């Protein structure tokens, strides 16, 4: 039986876990980050973490976990049909956020500094793009797309102070922002704009097992070809080269797959 797995190990004892927010465990240990990952021929998992792939091929099931990161963020932002959504960041998580928002009937625009990534976003189904090549003209471009209204939802999928600021600037009054990108750098900004626009800003971390289950159904029933985000494939024996290539070609590479 082909399965995927929830890799976000939680302690089960902290306040978050006791309230059911296991994705926000205070002692979270994600595979490949705080504990060993799965780049091996065999590894073991608790059976309760295994999720039936419902007949999807292994290559697709391998993409469900990163898709869950984006999908959880879109759920947190409560994206609705007909809304205009700006996804800031045209990397894998951003593109998958685009897929997730479009699956809810939203009109999705992708913003990035790299034209190559924007071209790829259009190829994969974006309703429009925004080249973020000049901070002085960013809001002007947002207004041109939205008729001066701003976006109903902005999804930050980069993790930079400047892109968080972009999300704030791009949001409509009473808009919603989902922070999916990870950053350790501070942002100094006029925070009264949050009150002025009455913005709703939510963080998004990891995902729930139910997100995995919902996505498998969405991909299977909607015939959504998420394998299109894989731009490069390598043998697992060339994993070091794969990481090196990705590090130096982030403008043109999205998801990298290792074939075992």
Image (tube, helix red, strand yellow):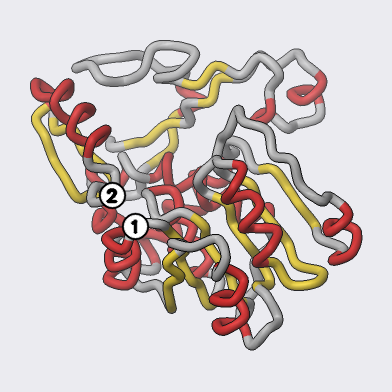
Q: Position of residue 65 (x, y in %)?
A: 42, 40
Q: Which mark is residue 188?
A: none
From the image, tell me which residue sits under label 2: 251
Question: Can residue 224 be spotted in the picture?
Answer: no
| Relative side of 57 to 65, left or right | left
Identity of the residue furthest to the bottom in this view? 147
* Residue located 42% across and 67% down the image: 131
What residue appears at the point 38 percent right and 59 percent down from the top-left corner?
219
Q: Quadrant of the C terminus?
A: top left
Q: Residues within 10 Å of mark 2 (few under 14, many from 20)?
A: some
Residue at image position (24%, 47%) is: 253
Distance in Å between CA atoms under marks 2 and 1: 6 Å
Which of 86 and 78 lies nearest the eye of the viewer?
A: 86
Which residue is at the front of the view, 85 or 50? Answer: 85
Q: Secondary structure at mark 2?
A: loop
Numbered label attached to residue 114:
1
User: x, y (%) of residue 148?
Assistant: 68, 84
Counting from the top left corner in percent of width and height, residue 110 is at: 45, 66
Against 40, residue 88 (above or below) is below
User: Badge 1, how many Cα within 10 Å: few under 14, some, many 20+?
Assistant: some
In the picture provided, is 121 more to the left or to the right than 215?
left
Q: Kindly indicate the quadrant of the structure image that contains residue 94.
A: bottom left
The residue nearer to you, when weighing 218 against 31, is 31
Name the one closer to the observer, 63 or 163. Answer: 163
Q: Horizontal placement of 97 versus 16: left or right?
A: left
Q: Secondary structure at mark 1?
A: loop
Q: Is residue 109 above or below residue 70?
A: below
Q: Of the residues under marks 2 and 1, which one precedes in the sequence?
A: 1
Q: Quadrant of the N terminus?
A: top left
Contact flag, marks 2 and 1 (Cβ < 8 Å) = yes
- The location of residue 156, given as percent across then percent down, is 58, 51
Count of numbered labels shown in the rendering: 2
């Amino acid at each position: 039986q082909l399965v995927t797995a929830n890799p976000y190990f939680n302690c089960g004892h902290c306040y978050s876990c006791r309230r059911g927010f296991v994705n926000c465990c205070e002692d979270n240990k994600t595979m490949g980050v705080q504990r060993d990952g799965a780049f091996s021929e065999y590894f073991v998992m608790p059976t309760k973490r295994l999720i039936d792939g419902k007949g999807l091929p292994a290559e697709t099931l391998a993409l469900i976990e990163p898709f869950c990161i984006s999908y959880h963020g879109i759920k947190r932002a409560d994206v609705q049909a007909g809304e205009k959504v700006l996804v800031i960041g045209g990397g894998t998580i951003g593109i998958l956020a685009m897929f997730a928002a479009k699956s809810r009937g939203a009109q999705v625009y992708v913003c990035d500094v790299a034209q190559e990534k924007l071209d790829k976003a259009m190829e994969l189904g974006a309703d429009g793009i925004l080249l973020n090549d000049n901070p002085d003209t960013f809001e002007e471009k947002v207004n041109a797309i939205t008729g001066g209204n701003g976006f109903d939802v902005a999804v930050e999928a980069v993790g930079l102070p400047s892109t968080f600021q972009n999300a704030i600037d791009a949001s409509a009054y009473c808009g919603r922002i989902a922070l999916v990108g990870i950053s350790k750098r501070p942002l100094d900004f006029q925070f009264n704009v949050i009150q002025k626009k009455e913005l709703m800003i939510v963080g998004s971390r990891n995902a729930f097992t139910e997100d995995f289950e919902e996505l498998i159904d969405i991909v299977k029933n909607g015939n959504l070809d998420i394998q299109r985000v894989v731009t490069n494939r390598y043998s697992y024996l060339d994993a070091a080269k794969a990481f090196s290539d990705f590090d130096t070609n982030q403008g043109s590479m999205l998801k990298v797959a290792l074939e075992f």
